[in-house]
Each structure stands twice: as structure tokens, then as C-alpha cells.
Amino acid sequence: MTFIRRHRVSLVLVALVGVVVALVVLRLREQQARAVPRVSREIQVGVVQPERRTLEVTLSFTGDVYPNRQTAIFAKTSGGGEASIACRAERSLTSAVIATVLLPSCAT
């Protein structure tokens, strides 16, 4: 008992050094285990020609189908117009009339 009382600081320091050495050894083993290269897995993927067939989709509902949200679309004019002619020269003959839109007058 007198030995422990006389050398208690030295014994605590030796115990701490032992714990630190043990932790360093464990850490080195862990790092060495991580350094071992793992076996790489080679995945082989094959390419298959897609199968072409007609799809028959039949929807059967007992009631009416409505969209989730309905929005009214209004023109950005405050009044009416007689006619509006849409013409696209790139896709049709020059100045050919593709559609005629009649704008009703807005009564407020």
C-alpha cells in the first residue's frame, strides 16, 4: 500500500500511456482494414431490342371525369373585335389564311 501511495502519480501516468497506446493500436488496425481494396463487382448489362406492339388502354368510370382544377380563359381586351386572321408564312403559302377567329363583344 505504501508503494501505491508513494508512486501514485507515476502509476496514473503509466496507466494513461497504456490506454493511449491501446487506442493507437486499435486505430492503426482499423485504418489498415480500410486500406485493403475490396473486390470490385463487374455488372454486365445486356441490350435487348424493344418489343413493339399496339397498346389497348380501356378506362371505365361510372361517372364523369373532370379535371382537378378548371380555369376560365379571358381575352386581354376590353371590348370586341370583328375578326382576327392568323397567318403563318413559314408553314403555308404566303399570306394564306389558316384560321379566322371571331371575337364577341364584352358587355359590361
Image (spheres, helix red, strand yellow):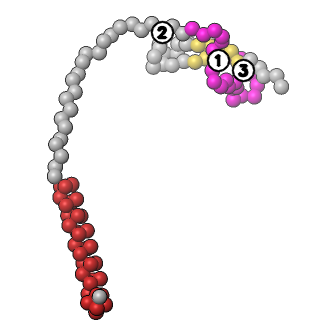
Q: Quadrant of residue 98?
A: top right
Element carrying mark 2: loop
Please tell me whether residue 62 belongs to the stretch shown in magenta. yes
Task: Indicate which label's residue lies in the foreground, 1 or 3.
Answer: 1
User: In the image, what residue type sits under mark 1?
Assistant: Tyr
Whether residue 108 is situated above or below residue 12 in the rendered picture: above
> Residue 86 location in percent, x, y?
58, 18
| Spatial CA span between label 1 and label 2 | 19 Å
Mark 1 near mark 3, Cβ–Cβ under 8 Å?
no
> Residue 108 location in percent, x, y?
83, 25
Mark 3 near mark 2, Cβ–Cβ under 8 Å?
no
Whether residue 44 is situated above or below residue 67 in the rendered picture: below
Q: Which residue is mark 1?
A: 66
Q: Residue at x 26, y 78 (%)?
A: 15
Q: Which residue is mark 2?
A: 57
Answer with mark 1 or mark 2, whichever residue precedes in sequence.
Answer: 2
Element carrying mark 3: strand
| 88 and 71: which is toward the camera | 71
Element carrying mark 1: loop
| Spatial CA span between label 1 and label 3 | 32 Å
Q: Which residue is mark 3?
A: 81
Which range is magenta? 60-84
